[in-house]
């Protein structure tokens, strides 16, 4: 195909796990890259952001797609819902139809899509069916589609690898439901990216469904034991075939950072074998030799150890202290605000560095055990808990998970806002604002926002306020101490 490095490529799903790694890989090859995102703020912090063109749009809103696809030669469709409910499948198909129709209108020459392995006739889960149906809808408009189908993707930060990693690290004797003995064909993230990029210049890949996998066919249990071998751990698997998918999903939810909702979708998909049955990938891409499983695990662990995780699956008020009280509790338009202030003898860069390092393995500086207990309670209620951790111990980006928070806004050296994803009777945020003072110190303001839902929300806030007050007062004090070291 006539695709060179002056060709503009569109990447959807750039805030996701695959898309976030594909973009810099395309840039390294010299391609001109445009990304389509619903919220451009979620790209803040990506080192490649200055090198790409960003277009705001939504695949469920057809009118936003034509400008994104104008002048595009090839487009990557890397969008897939992991939501639950009766309509997620229809939303996936509608999004694919909107995209393919707009691509046809703008004379796009190729759509490259990453779907899932599995026999459609073998009682696939709804999510796997949706992924394969999405590929068919993308091809329905007549634009040539290259559809890759993969099973478990092994890479630092991928949801499948993180599930295997946490199960193996945390549970020395594992009670194993039936899906642990399902066969699959895991593939390294580096190999997936190689296939995706090679499709741009391989004419034989047009209008093809290409199954890709690693060198071995193994069970999920063997994946856990293989991971344990690389880590030097001894693990025992005990089969318990009568454990239902629902109970199994709760087990995964409790042991790993995966929420109960996503765990259920994953477990449903794991009941099906996901194997390469068509060897056409070898004929179409003879130069690509997939990595073996243990090497893929070693590479992923090396990136984790070096804090070089590019994306995760999990890949949205200042004044001088004067005579103001150090803490104020007010209500504005139904939102309760607890504001604490302190002056810090350090520059704003240093204070923001401390703020950017909160959570994860370092913990929360003050009463970390209380944060841990709150995370356990959230997990018991089916929430995300603290086990999602953070992508990097020092770097922080808009849109990424930070324990049971979501980073909602960053203005480096000025503002950091976190939105709670805990199960609570209301919406909660934690915000930090920094400002220089006349005495050349930094004024740090810590604001806890809570928008209660009805009477349960108000009861939740005021019953727990004594504990929250103790924790938040200690937290801002420890931030001050750590910043002044």
Image (spheres, rainbow, N blue to C red):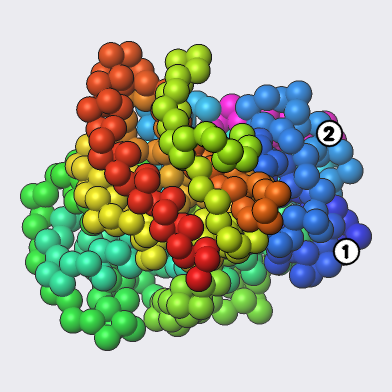
Disc ID at residue 67: 2
Q: Which residue is mark 1?
A: 4
Instruction: Give me the residue at 30% from left, 64% from top.
Output: 166
Instruction: Give me the residue at 52% from left, 66% from top.
Output: 484
**Residue 260 % position (x, y):** 29, 42
Range of residues picked out in magenta: 92-106
Mark earlier in primary sequence (1, 2): 1
Q: Is residue 169 magenta?
A: no
Secondary element at image label 2: helix
Horizontally, residue 373 falls left or right of residue 399, namely left
Farthest residue, direction front: 323
Alpha carbon distance from label 1 to label 2: 22 Å
Quick one: 217 or 321, which is closer to the camera?
A: 321
Answer yes or no: is residue 56 visible.
yes
Dots 1, 2 in contact, CB < 8 A: no
Quick one: 260 or 436, which is closer to the camera?
A: 436
Disc ID at residue 411: none
Label 2 neighbour load within 10 Å: few <14, some 14-19, many 20+:
some
Mark 1, mark 2: which one is toward the viewer?
2
- Image quarter where the N terminus lies is bottom right
């Amino acid at each position: 195909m006539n695709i060179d490095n002056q060709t503009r490529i569109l990447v959807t799903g750039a805030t996701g796990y695959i898309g976030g790694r594909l973009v810099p890989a395309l840039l390294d090859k010299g391609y001109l890259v445009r990304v389509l995102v619903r919220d451009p703020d979620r790209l803040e912090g990506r080192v490649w952001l200055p090198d790409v063109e960003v277009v705001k749009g939504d695949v469920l809103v057809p009118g936003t797609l034509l400008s994104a696809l104008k002048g595009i030669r090839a487009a990557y469709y890397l969008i897939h819902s992991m939501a639950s409910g009766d309509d997620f499948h229809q939303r996936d198909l509608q999004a694919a139809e909107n995209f393919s129709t707009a691509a046809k209108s703008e004379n796009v020459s190729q759509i490259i899509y990453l779907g899932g392995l599995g026999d459609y006739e073998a009682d696939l889960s709804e999510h796997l069916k949706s992924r394969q149906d999405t590929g068919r809808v993308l091809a329905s408009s007549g634009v040539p589609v290259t559809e890759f189908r993969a099973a478990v993707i092994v890479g630092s930060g991928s949801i499948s690898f993180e599930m295997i990693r946490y199960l193996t690290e945390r549970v020395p004797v594992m009670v194993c439901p039936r899906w642990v003995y399902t066969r699959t064909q895991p593939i390294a993230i580096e190999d997936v990216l190689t296939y995706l990029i090679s499709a741009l210049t391989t004419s034989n890949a047009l209008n093809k469904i290409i199954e890709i996998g690693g060198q071995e066919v193994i069970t999920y249990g063997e994946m856990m034991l293989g991971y344990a071998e690389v880590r030097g751990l001894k693990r025992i698997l005990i089969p318990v075939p009568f454990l239902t998918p629902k109970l199994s999903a709760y087990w995964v939810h409790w042991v790993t950072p995966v929420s109960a909702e996503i765990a259920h979708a994953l477990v449903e998909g794991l009941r099906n074998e996901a194997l390469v049955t068509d060897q056409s990938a070898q004929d179409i891409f003879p130069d690509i030799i997939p990595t073996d499983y243990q090497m893929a695990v070693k590479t992923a662990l090396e990136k984790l150890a070096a804090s070089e995780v590019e994306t995760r699956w999990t890949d949205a008020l200042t004044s001088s202290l004067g005579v103001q009280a150090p803490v104020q509790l007010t209500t504005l338009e139904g939102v309760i605000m607890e504001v604490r202030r302190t002056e810090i003898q350090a520059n704003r860069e240093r204070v923001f560095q401390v703020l950017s390092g909160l959570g994860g393995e370092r913990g929360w500086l003050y009463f970390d055990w209380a944060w841990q207990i709150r995370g356990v309670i959230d997990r018991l209620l089916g929430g995300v808990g603290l086990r999602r951790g953070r992508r990097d111990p020092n770097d922080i980006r808009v849109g990424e998970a930070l324990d049971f928070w979501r980073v909602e806004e960053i203005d480096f050296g000025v503002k950091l806002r976190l939105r709670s994803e805990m199960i609570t009777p209301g919406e909660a945020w934690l915000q930090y604002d920094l400002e220089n003072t006349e005495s050349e110190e930094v004024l740090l303001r810590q604001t806890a926002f809570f928008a209660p839902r009805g009477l349960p929300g108000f009861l939740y806030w005021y019953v727990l306020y004594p504990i929250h007050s103790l924790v938040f007062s200690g937290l801002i004090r420890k931030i001050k101490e750590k910043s002044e070291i």
